[in-house]
Image (cartoon, rainbow, N blue to C red):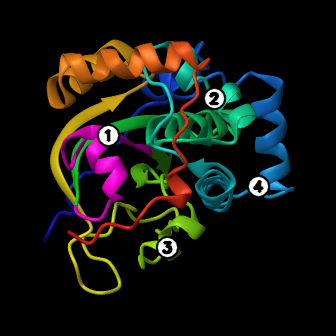
Amino acid sequence: MSVEPTIPTESSENLLIYTTPTSIIDSDNPSVQDLARRTANGATDPVEIAVKLYLTVRDGIRYDPYGPLYLPRHYQASQVIKRGKNFCIPKASLLCALGRASRIPSRLGFANVRNHLATRQLLEHLGTDIFAYHAFVEFHLGGKWVKATPAFNRELCARHNVPPLEFNGREDSLFQPYNGENKRFMEYVEFLGTYADVPVSEILLGCRKIYGEERVNNWIRMWEAKGGESSSDFEREDVWHG
């Protein structure tokens, strides 16, 4: 007689940390709570809600790689809603907060990725095609962790001839390796682990390692001089096919 393998499940006590608000993942903030409620629109199934939340963040917060990254408030979910555009980590922070506000255990995952299809201006800005600490979200659904990557909004994907990344709440949703022309798009170089909160110090350290001390310090001086904003407009930049 064959015996089915036992699949370990996480206890509710272990998952509690992933349902608890933090000062950055402020799922108890009224604006986060309101957006979660409006997005769910009466749905009660956690998978259905997670998919709705994913689409809200993917397309409702435009991708902007030039946002500031050196202070905790730059990643705060309620501030991401106010700004309306941001890069992958703040977008993931917001999605994580919305998940927790909807009573879905949610955490952050990070990886260094190689972007084969960025804009010429962005590659010049970074000095490399490696993106440090790219972020995604893991929802605990159906007894397992499922990855969701809300970084690139639908309009941006169309510009780069890449289908928008979908999420069904049951399977991992990670960046497409190829675009619509069968050219390399995204490559995961190194997975960096999962976190219950945004590891701001680790992110800044990782950016300094990959982009260089001088480059990151120049960005910080620029952000401080411009009140946390950049003069770059990513949506108008040249699509790079290098």
Q: Report, in whole angstroms, how far the alpha carbon at label 4 lies from the one at label 1.
A: 44 Å
Q: Report, in whole angstroms, how far the alpha carbon at label 3 lies from the one at label 4.
A: 35 Å
The residue nearer to you, when weighing 12 against 193, is: 193
Reply above or below: 239 against 138: below
Residue visible at 73% across and 22% down in the picture: 28
Q: Choose the circle earlier in sequence order: 4 or 1.
A: 4
Magenta residues (range): 116-137
Q: Amino acid at mark 2?
A: Ala
Q: Amino acid at mark 1?
A: His
Query: Secondary structure beneath disc 1?
Result: helix
Q: Which residue is mark 3?
A: 159
The spot of residue 189 in percent (x, y) is 14, 49
Q: Are marks 3 and 4 in contact (CB under 8 Å)?
A: no
Which of discs 1 and 3 lies nearer the camera? The answer is 1
Q: Choose the circle earlier in sequence order: 3 or 2.
A: 2
Quarter of the picture holding the C terminus: bottom left
Q: Choose the circle earlier in sequence order: 2 or 1.
A: 2
The spot of residue 182 in percent (x, y) is 24, 85
The residue nearer to you, when weighing 69 against 52, is: 69
Q: Which residue is mark 2?
A: 77
Can you see residue 239? yes
Q: Is residue 135 left or right of residue 223?
A: left
Query: Secondary structure beneath disc 3?
Result: helix
Which of discs 3 and 4 lies nearer the camera? The answer is 3
Can you see residue 164? no
